[in-house]
Every structure is written in C-alpha cells, then in structure tokens.
C-alpha cells in the first residue's frame, strides 16, 4: 500500500479548502507550518542494565484559539512529519469542536509491547520530564493516543507535578478517574463518532434502518465503537487489528470478542467468525466503514473497491486525498476525522475544565454536552458542504480555518 507523507496530506487538505475561504494568503502560509517542534532523546535503562536511546517529539502547530492540545503516540514508526501532521489536524479538530485550543501532538518512536512495565514507566516519566518545559495547563495539554492509556497519563502527570512541586490535574487529560480523570473520557472518541454518524444517517434518510459496519483497529477507539454503535442500529460484522481480521455477516458479539482479544492479544483466531485480511475488512459489503487504526489506510490503490456508503474516520488521517477523490466519484460520504473523532478531545476539554474548577460532572452531563456540541458542529459543516457543493472534509476545513484565521487576524502577525 503506497503511503503519502501525512504532513503532505495536511497541506493538500488545506489547499483543497482555501478556494472557499476569502482570506489573505499569509494566514494560509502560517497554517502550513507548525509553530515549533521539540525533539528529545531519551536514554532508556532496560531490564538487562543496558541503555537504549529513544527519540520523542512534541509539535505545537497553532495556538491562536488557546493553549495547544493533543495526544501522545507510542509507535515504532513514529516520525517527526507524522507528529507535525497530527498536531496540524488537532488545530483543525479543536476549531471544529469549538474548543478554546490550538493543535499539538507528541510521539515516541518505540514498540511499547516489547517493553516491560518498568521500562514503559521509566520511558513515560523520562518523556514527561523532557517535554515539561514545553507544556502545562495554559500552554499545552497532552492526552492519550495510539498505544498510550490512562496509566501512561498517570505517570506523565505525576512526573510533571513533581517538577512543579504542586498538584496540577489539568495539565494532562485522559487520566484515571482516581487522579482527576473525567467520567465518559474512555469511550468519548467512539461516542462522539456515534453522535456524528447518527446525524449523517438522518440527513441521508438511513437512520432507523438496520445497517452493517466493519471496523479497522480494535483498540480504545475501535473497541468502544463496536460496543456502542448498536445503540443507533449499526451491527458490526467485521473487525481487524494489526494481526488481521475476523468476519461474520450475522454480526460479532462485542463482549465475547473483547474477552477473546484480552486473553489471546488479537481478534484473528476468534471462533465466532471467519479469519480475513485487513484489506477484506476495508472492502467488505457494508453500509459504514470505520477506520480506527492508523493513517493512510484507504489509498488510491484500494479506494475503488470500498463498498461502504459512508466512511466514518475515527482514526486520524486514514484516507489519502487521492483516495478521497475516487470515493467522491463513487458517491461515498467521507465523514472526516477532524469531526468524526473530535469527541475525544472534546471530553478532554471537559476534563481540563473539571480539573481547573474541582467541580466533577456526572457521566450523563458529559454525554449531553458532547452530543450537543458535535450535533451542532455536524449541521454547521453539512450546511457549508451543501451550500458550496463540496466534500465534508473541505467544509470542515473551511469552517475551522475560518475560525483560526479570524483569531489570528485579531491578534495580528508578530515576529
Ligand atoms: P489503540 O492503540 O488503542 O489501538 C490501535 C488499534 O489499531 C489496535 O487494535 C491495533 O492492533 C490496530 N492496528 C494497528 N495497525 C493496524 C493495521 N495495519 N491494520 C489493522 N489494525 C491495526 O489506539 P486508539 O487510541 O484506539 O487510536 C486509534 C486511532 O484513533 C488513531 O488514529 C488515533 O490517532 C485516533 N484517535 C484516538 C483518540 C483517542 O482518544 N484515543 C482520539 C482521536 C483520534
């Protein structure tokens, strides 16, 4: 599968939205670069006593709307360009969800599954220390992403609080509830995607009909999507993780499959379905395809074989611009990542507010506020899409870039 550099994908997405915005080119030029990127080299002491050098990054893309916000990814293929792209997508996403944030992202080039728990903790604490002067409650607030979780956030915030010498729960989000996490953060990304999909189905006259979906990626986001989407009448008939896929046209039972994944480490040998490849999951005869793994999965090489009517991008950057053009030709609606997966950062924002005020909300309040915000964002973007006869991603970028540029214009351009 040919993969496009993710930062080049972002640049192309900006170019595709720019003709529909009446703005000065200088602001577009600013958006096309991250403001600053920190690279850190971490000496990691391994269990055998040796030291291995590990590279990490934190990219600040734009902070016209407020402090930088974005997750931290642990993956052996992380690159600076990927982290830069993910930070830029966060700027667009925060503006899409109407949050008072700019965009950031962090990444560590490591295979966390090859580390012992002790090594993972030492690495996480060293990364938190390395970026400590580059983040903070009103500067940049990190959160979980691929292969990081509430335990990692707990090590991050604990290390940062030791640097500060005082308690600062709002410096990190996605924390365990016991140390200031928010109710409803765990499934927030998938739940937000469900609200957005529900509104799209209503617009398309499909809401209430029995629908089928496949999910690529069975981690935090993909797993919760499987658990939740039956609430809106969507049956999941296939899922894939990094080892391969499993498929059953009658539907896959979430609790049973998750139990299997927890014990065996993968979905592939689940007895309740047939083993298939990841490509077969992407190309299955379904109504909704849900990429929830990594970027660059739907490319010009396979886009023509996608049978779904809707792609709900719960992953960041799963569809390349060339693939999107093919999907448009084939009348496939792509609900873009910057809207579809913005539930995670939205509830992270709720966690930040709760951490700052000490007033913690009920799960019901979190769900209601999330639903209200994303439903509004969906309809505003849908209106722009219809008015200009453009793709949903272009419409989302038009709205988000307009908001960021309006803030930049008030602030003025400083050296
Ligand atoms: P995770 O680490 O919990 O899960 C990732 C999953 O993807 C795993 O099941 C892994 O096996 C699978 N995977 C990796 N490579 C694959 C491949 N080639 N084919 C099939 N499956 C593959 O990560 P996550 O937090 O669920 O994040 C998934 C995506 O959602 C990422 O793009 C991430 O940036 C995005 N996202 C996450 C959040 C969040 O709150 N966690 C918020 C917004 C967006």
Image (tube, rainbow, N blue to C red):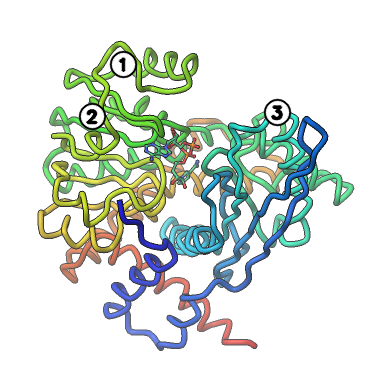
Q: Do the CB atoms of the residues marked 3 and 2 lie less than 8 Å apart?
A: no
**Circle 3 residue:** 117
Q: Is residue 389 left or right of residue 134?
A: left
Ligand 1, image quadrant it occupies = top left
Q: Quadrant of residue 131?
A: bottom right
Question: How far is mark 3 from mark 1, CA to CA?
Answer: 31 Å
Q: Secondary structure at mark 2?
A: strand
Residue 162 in the image, given as x and y percentages of width and height: 86, 45
Question: How far is mark 3 from mark 2, CA to CA?
Answer: 37 Å
Badge nearest the viewer, 3 or 2: 3
Q: Secondary structure at mark 3?
A: helix
Determine the residue positioned at 19% across, 39% down: 283
**Circle 1 residue:** 253
Between residues 71 and 271, which one lies in front from this camera angle? 271
Q: Is residue 80 left or right of residue 224?
A: right
Determine the residue positioned at 27% across, 80% down: 19
Residue 350 in the image, given as x and y percentages of width and height: 57, 45
Q: Is residue 381 above or below residue 31?
A: above
Between residues 68 and 371, which one lies in front from this camera angle? 68
**Circle 2 residue:** 234
Between residues 231 and 12, which one lies in front from this camera angle? 12
Mark 3 close to ligand 1, CB under 8 Å = no
Q: Which mark is on residue 186?
A: none
Residue 378 in the image, given as x and y percentages of width and height: 31, 53
Question: How far is mark 1 from mark 2, CA to CA?
Answer: 13 Å
Between residues 398 and 237, which one lies in front from this camera angle? 237
Please rate how many residues cluster around mark 2, counting C-alpha atoms within 10 Å: few if below 14, some from 14 to 19, many from 20: many
Q: Secondary structure at mark 1?
A: loop
């Amino acid at each position: 599968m040919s993969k496009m550099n993710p930062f080049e994908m972002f640049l192309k997405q900006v170019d595709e939205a720019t003709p529909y915005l009446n703005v000065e080119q200088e602001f577009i030029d600013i958006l096309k670069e991250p403001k600053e990127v920190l690279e850190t080299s971490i000496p990691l002491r391994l269990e055998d006593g040796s030291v291995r050098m590990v590279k990490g990054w934190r990219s600040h893309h734009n902070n016209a709307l407020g402090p930088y916000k974005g997750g931290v990814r642990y993956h052996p293929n992380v690159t600076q360009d990927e982290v830069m792209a993910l930070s830029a997508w966060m700027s667009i996403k925060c503006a899409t969800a109407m949050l008072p944030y700019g965009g950031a992202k962090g990444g560590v080039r490591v295979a966390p599954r090859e580390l012992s728990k002790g090594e993972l903790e030492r690495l996480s604490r060293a990364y938190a220390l390395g970026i400590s002067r580059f983040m903070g409650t009103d500067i940049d607030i990190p959160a979980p992403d691929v292969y990081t979780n509430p335990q990692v956030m707990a090590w991050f915030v604990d290390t940062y609080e030791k640097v500060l010498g005082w308690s600062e729960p709002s410096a990190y989000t996605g924390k365990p509830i016991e140390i200031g996490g928010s109710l409803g953060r765990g499934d927030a990304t998938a739940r937000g995607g469900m609200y957005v999909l529900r509104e799209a189905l209503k617009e398309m006259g499909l809401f209430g009909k029995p629908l089928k979906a496949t999910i690529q990626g069975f981690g935090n986001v993909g797993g919760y999507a499987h658990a939740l989407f039956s609430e809106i009448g969507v049956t999941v008939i296939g899922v894939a993780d990094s080892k391969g896929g499993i498929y059953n046209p009658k539907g896959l039972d979430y609790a049973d499959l998750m139990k299997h994944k927890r014990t065996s480490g993968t979905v592939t040998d689940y007895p309740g379905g047939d083993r298939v490849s990841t490509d077969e999951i992407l190309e299955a005869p379904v109504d909704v395809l849900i990429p929830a793994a990594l970027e660059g999965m739907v490319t010009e090489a396979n886009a023509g074989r996608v049978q779904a009517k809707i792609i709900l991008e719960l992953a960041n950057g799963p569809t390349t611009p060339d693939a999107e053009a093919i999907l448009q030709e084939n009348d496939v609606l792509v609900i873009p990542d910057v809207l579809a997966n913005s539930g995670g950062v939205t509830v992270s924002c709720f966690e930040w507010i709760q951490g700052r005020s000490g007033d913690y909300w009920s799960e019901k309040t979190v769900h209601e506020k999330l639903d209200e915000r994303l439903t509004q964002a969906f309809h505003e973007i849908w209106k722009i899409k219809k008015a200009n006869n453009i793709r949903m991603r272009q419409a989302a970028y038009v709205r988000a870039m307009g908001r960021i540029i309006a803030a930049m214009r008030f602030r003025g351009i400083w050296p």
